[in-house]
Image (tube, helix red, strand yellow):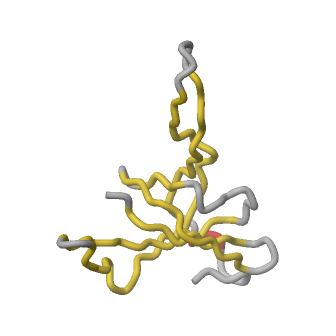
Amino acid sequence: MLTTKESIGQLDERITIQSLTTAFDTYGSKTETWADLATVWAKIEYRQNVSDEEFLGLRQVERTTVWFTIRWRGDVTPKMRISYGGNYYDIATISKIGRRNYEKLEAELRE
């Protein structure tokens, strides 16, 4: 975990935070698309168990949880997602670290 006294150099991976936007085409049809909010430096941590497995209905579902620690922004919400390494991660929770120093985004890999 990154604390306020640790080096900002631990934020060594680039991620893109995306927000869902709604637009209307010329026929008035609603279209939802993801737009880049910001590309930021992040520290990436994987859960000790890289994936949790649970059963939904009659099928097994694998969940991969990753923590992305970024500098505090204040405009990131759980309705957004993260693009990293060719994958998309849905933000589940956001934890503040220090007084507006960092944010820790807990996210699940979107299958």
Q: Is residue 57 above or below residue 3?
A: above
**Which residue lies most toward the right here?**
99
Number of numbered markers: 0
Name the residue: 70% across, 71% down: 102
| Quarter of the picture holding the C terminus | bottom left
Picture quadrant of residue 71: bottom right
Q: Residue furthest front?
A: 57
Q: Please indicate whether residue 65 sits to the left or right of residue 9 in the image.
A: left
Along the line of sight, the residue nearer the viewer: 14 or 97 = 97
Query: Residue 34, how many percent across, how many down?
Result: 52, 41
Outermost residue to the top: 26
Q: Position of residue 52 (x, y in %)?
A: 31, 80
Q: In front here: 17 or 3?
A: 17
Instruction: Give 85 or 94, whichever is nearer the viewer.
Output: 94
Dividing the picture into quadrants, the one containing residue 89 is bottom left
Residue lying farthest to the left in this orientation:
58
Residue at the image position 46 percent from the left and 75 percent from the top: 45
* Relative horizontal placement of residue 109, taking residue 19 as reference (left or right): left
